[in-house]
């Protein structure tokens, strides 16, 4: 069993609440638009950290993190990228990979809109954790925690960490 803390779109913004809410997690995953290597290092100092780069990330961040990650944790195959779209409207840059080899869990960020949806066609859970940073149009900053356990995704929590701005 692994407890995962998930966020996206920090845009180089650090909030002490990240430490509070992710202290019980085994890993932290970031779905892009990290903002800087210094911010990534703060997450890496907390817990094992997996991340992809986003469209605002500079060359240093892009050199340290991949555009797309595919990995397995607790028998759950995960595909994570920054710009992914939603079930029925996946981004063309990831659509072929999704349909050729659907993961059990697909994670993306970018929209700043928190959504958790099940794609019946792909038999895949889609999660966009919204935006945890202070840049963008979102009104509330959000994080997600969930548990991966022997092929199951369970105990998903949406956490509002404060108003934008």
Image: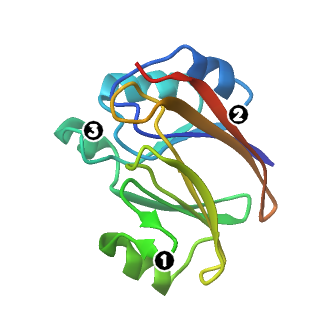
Camera-nearest residue between 124 and 120: 120
Q: Which residue is mark 1?
A: 88
Q: Is residue 15 left or right of residue 63?
A: right
- Secondary structure at badge 3 equals helix
Q: Which residue is mark 2?
A: 25
User: What is the C-alpha distance between the residues marked 1 and 3?
Assistant: 30 Å
- Outermost residue toward the top? 16
**What x and y, as percent, mark residue 58?**
19, 38
Camera-nearest residue between 11 and 76: 11
User: Which circle's residue, 2 or 1, is located before the other in the chain?
Assistant: 2
**What x and y, as percent, mark residue 7?**
52, 39
Location of the C terminus by quadrant is top left
Q: Is residue 138 left or right of residue 63?
A: right
**What x and y, as percent, mark residue 111?**
39, 49
User: What is the C-alpha distance between the residues marked 3 and 2?
Assistant: 24 Å
Task: Residue 141: give its label.
Answer: none
Mark 2–mark 1 contact, CB under 8 Å?
no
Q: Residues within 10 Å of mark 2 (few under 14, many from 20)?
A: some
Query: Measured along the vertical axis of the image, is residue 4 above or below residue 152?
Result: above
Closer mark to the observer between disc 2 and disc 1: 1
């Amino acid at each position: 069993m692994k407890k995962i803390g998930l966020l996206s779109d920090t845009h180089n913004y650090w909030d002490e609440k990240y430490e509070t809410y992710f202290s019980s997690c085994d890993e932290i995953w970031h779905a892009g638009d990290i903002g800087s290597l210094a911010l990534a290092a703060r997450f890496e100092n907390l817990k094992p950290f997996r991340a992809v780069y986003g469209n605002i990330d500079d060359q240093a961040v892009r050199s340290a993190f991949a555009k797309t990650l595919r990995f397995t944790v607790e028998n759950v195959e995960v595909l994570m990228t920054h710009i992914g779209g939603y079930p029925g409207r996946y981004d063309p840059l990831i659509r072929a990979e999704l349909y050729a080899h659907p993961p059990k869990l697909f994670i993306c960020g970018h929209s700043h809109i928190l959504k958790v949806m099940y794609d019946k066609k792909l038999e895949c859970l889609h999660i966009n954790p919204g935006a945890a940073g202070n840049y963008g149009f979102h009104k509330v900053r959000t994080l997600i925690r969930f548990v991966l356990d022997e092929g199951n995704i369970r105990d998903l929590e949406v956490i509002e960490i404060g108003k934008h701005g």
